[in-house]
Amino acid sequence: MTSDPNQAMYDRIDTVLASNKRAEQIVIGMSVMIFLIGSALIVAGVLNKLPAIYAPAAIIEAFLYWPINKILVIRKENIALAAAPALIATLPPEQAAAEMVKLLEKVNG
């Protein structure tokens, strides 16, 4: 039985994807919390005719931009990492190494 020399790379990619999944779930949870708090405050402010409540709630809702943006970044990284093994397997070793370096630079920012 021969072992795949790239198995360590595949295992590392799987670990990163699992880590990204946890981060994605945390960010989604944060965004749901922000949305629910903001919505509740907007409804309470409008029903009680208190702009001092619903105006800040609208600002709280604006904070949804960060979690949504973070989710999109995490998903892009996951797609790149998931596609990397298939792409690299089709390339000659020198070109595969160069592509892997570019991918890692892009993922690391």
Image (cartoon, rainbow, N blue to C red):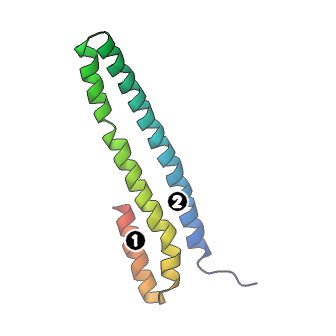
> Mark 2: which amino acid?
Val
Q: Secondary structure at mark 2?
A: helix
Residue located 44% across and 56% down the image: 75
x%, y% of residue 89? 53, 83
Q: Earlier in the sequence, mark 2 or mark 1?
A: 2
> Mark 1: which amino acid?
Leu
Position of 48 relative to 31 (above/below) = above
Residue located 42% across and 55% down the image: 74
Looking at the rendered image, the quarter that the N terminus falls into is bottom right
From the image, tell me which residue sits under label 2: 16
Task: From the viewer's perspective, tell me whether residue 55 is left or right of residue 23.
Answer: left
Q: Quadrant of residue 27?
A: top left
From the image, tell me which residue sits under label 1: 103
Cα separation between marks 2 and 1: 14 Å
Looking at the rendered image, the quarter that the C terminus falls into is bottom left
Considering every residue shown, the one lying at the far top of the view is 48
Q: Residues within 10 Å of mark 1 (few under 14, many from 20)?
A: some
Position of 99 relative to 31 (above/below) = below
User: Which residue is at the front of the view, 107 or 44?
Assistant: 44
CB under 8 Å between discs 2 and 1: no
